[in-house]
Amino acid sequence: MNINMLSTFGLDFTDESLTTEYAKSFNAFTESIIELDLSGCIIDYEAMSAIMDAIIKQLDTRPAPKHLNIVFNIKFQKRLFLKWLFMGSKELHLNIKVATDELIEATVISEFKKRQINLTISIADQEAQTLTPIIAYAY
């Protein structure tokens, strides 16, 4: 299942009340492979975790192999991607106010491994039409 977040919901994923509403649309998918394209979107932690939680919860119910592929069009440091996507996640037990970058990464790795969900975060080069993985956790 490919989800282009910009064309589906717009560009702003910084408001937790909006992302909580958007997350409801992820409650019915049946695929085990999800590609979430956030190219052109503005994301922020805690708000984005509502969407991530909905996807993780649904993938938990799917048979293996399970994959969550997240695509961006701008490259940031790995720690920023992990924080913006997963800080505040109830599913990953990161719904705390303060967490180090190391704790966030260790928790993401541990929880995805426990759930047997492969995670890839890639940068899209629109001109070359390529994806370059910057984070990949396979289980």
Image: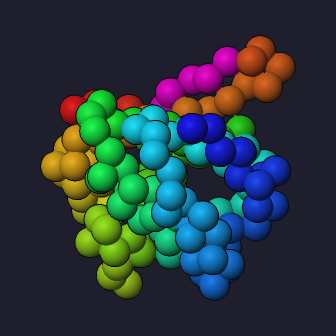
Residue 118 coordinates in the image, percent (x, y): 33, 36
| Residue 52 against residue 38 in the figure, above or below | below
The reply, left or right, for residue 8 in relation to residue 17 is right
Report the predominant secondary structure element of the magenta stretch.
Answer: strand
Instruction: Name which quarter of the figure residue 39 lies in.
Output: top right
Q: Residue 86: x and y, percent?
A: 43, 62
Q: Which residue lies furthest to the top in this view?
A: 128
Nearer the observer, 125 or 30: 30
Which residue corresponds to the image point at 68% horizontal and 29% vertical from the top-left?
124
Q: In this view, does 1 lie to the left or right of 86?
A: right
Q: Which residues are the magenta region?
A: 130-134
Quadrant in the rendering for residue 53: bottom left
Residue 139 visible here: yes
How many numbered marks, from 0 up?
0
Instruction: Give the camera-side residue of 81 and 69.
Output: 69
Whether residue 94 appears in magenta in the rendering, the answer is no
Camera-side residue of 24 and 101: 24
Left or right of 130? Residue 87 is left
Picture residue at 81% right of the left edge, 61% below the top: 10
From the top left corner, tell me how far across and down residue 59 is, in percent: 36, 49
- For the N terminus, which image quadrant? top right
Tell me if residue 91 comes above or below residue 79 in the rendering: below
Task: Decide if residue 74 is in sight here.
Answer: no
* Residue 133 painted magenta: yes
